[in-house]
Image (cartoon, rainbow, N blue to C red):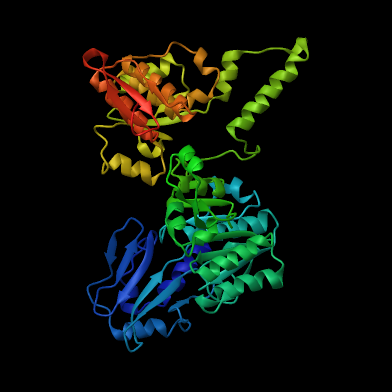
Amino acid sequence: MSEVQYKSDLTKLIEILPPKIRRTIYDGLLDEAIEIVLDIGRLPEVRLGNGKIEYLGTDTVTSDEIDYITSKIPEFTSDNRSGLAGTLHRISAIRNRQGKIIGLTCRIGRVITGTIACIKDFVMQNKSILFLGRPGVGKTTKLREISRLVADELGKRVVVVDTSNEIAGDGDVAHPAIGKARRMQVSQPEFQKDIMIEAVENHTPEVIVVDEIGTELEVQAARTIAERGVMLIATAHGNTLDNLIKNPAMSDLVGGVSSVTLGDDEAKHRGSQKTVLEREKQPTFDIVIEIIDRNTLAVYKDTAEAVDCILRGWPVTPEIRKVDREYDFKKPIKTEIEKTIDKVNELDSRTKNPMNFSFNRQAYVKSVKNKKSIYIYAVSRSIVNKIIERLDLDVEIARNVEDADIVIAHKNFAKGGTKILSIANEYRLPVYFVRTNTMSQIQKVLKDALHLAENPDFKEAKTDFKDDSELALDEARAAIAKVMEGAESIELEPQPQNIRKLQHELADSYNLQSNSIGEGNERRLVISKDEEIM
């Protein structure tokens, strides 16, 4: 979209405003504006993207000024929306009980490019993608750009099901922002489901783009489209994947939820109640992307796996993508496991020819590590740096929590309402807690956070730090494993009260019984499945 086109679009919107209001709009005022709000008896408002409000003049809006605007635009549809032909602007009406228009919201539509550059690799995988996010965060903007990308760059047959003409603008000619994609208009919102099916049956699309799936019938239509092998790109009502799962009418988009009764052995194995929630079927969408803000997206690359983890209470961490960062998608996207297998295969091929053998173990270990950025809160930075250096970890300490992959916080200082935890939750960052600012405790949490136990070569690194509490907890973990495998009970070594408390908490986390026996310095724990210790 050229700058000339962009300016002419704004001009068309300004031209429908009454002269008195039009004269109050100075150059640059609408550059960052989201909408112009006009209500009878109130001052005209310009709402900006940063949340601020600018008032236009000192005179309140009159009924004649509302009539002036409505006389210059097409009639409102049943959902009280209208638009300007050839633009992306939208005008919505507020009516009184008699049906008279008493207020207008003029939403400023813009073509913003580059908003999907960070997720271009997912768009090109030919998988169905669902976008979630609060209103005004840019869901429709991304649909518009994806439509153009898939139609123009990939050469696919794209049909946009355009309810209220939000994606491709008003008028019979679709806005050039969607490229070569075709557009099917929807006369009334309740007909969106019918147009979705009609698009598949009549126009042989390879890709269908839909904005705001919000009813159970539209959810069923989306599943029908996906089952016919058509790639579906859509948005839905709901801020997060967790919210969507809990919505009975919408959960079918991600596989649906059903209540299942487990057998006694399975319930014990899972450490859960006998009645649990399970995913009912294969999700309609392969990938779910939460739009946290205009610059940050959380990507669940496997919807089925993510939903299963959420329903079972297991931790699931989406991949965070930033709009203002550059990503190299020239090479195929591979997981860390696939990269490691490729490296092993490469080394094996070299060993077959002694002349080509050159194996640098340190370089190999470094190549298969997954570099992380951690944010620490109320945790000793000097101790963390010492551990990183001593264990030769390929990590860095982030200045801001928004830039981190992992958060490590002190349990005593990070309460439920702490701002850091709120930000970490908003950005879907895993949070790990340390109980004390000791070398051994911080090292243990750091190793858990970085999943170093999964690297078989890591134990060959420099000596780990261990104190009495860590050794005692290791003993408790070994006992828990034996009890879970069938042992009646396991008796631990005598420990002080503070360490026994930690062992009790560990046993409780596995739904096992733990009792203290003995007196004085011989007091110790017995871990068992039974409620009574023999």
Write the residue at 37% across / 73% down: 105
Residue 341, percent from left and from top: 66, 27
Write the residue at 28% across / 24% down: 516
Tell me where residue 187 sits by quadrant.
bottom right
Residue 405, percent from left and from top: 43, 35
Given residues 291 and 464, the one toward you in this image is 464
Write the residue at 41% across / 58% down: 134
* Quadrant (top left, top right, bottom left, bottom right) of the N terminus: bottom right
Given residues 473 and 156, the one toward you in this image is 473
Say how many tags the image has.
Answer: 0
Residue 320, placed above or below residue 442: below
Residue reaching furthest to the bottom = 98
Is residue 168 visible to the viewer in this orientation of the structure? no
Is residue 124 visible to the viewer in this orientation of the structure? yes
Residue 523, percent from left and from top: 26, 18
User: In the image, 472: left or right of 157?
Assistant: left
* Quadrant (top left, top right, bottom left, bottom right) of the C terminus: top left
Residue 326, placed above or below residue 521: below
Residue 13, placed above or below residue 127: below
User: In the image, 519: left or right of 405?
Assistant: left
Given residues 467 and 265, the one toward you in this image is 265
Write the residue at 47% across / 40% down: 270
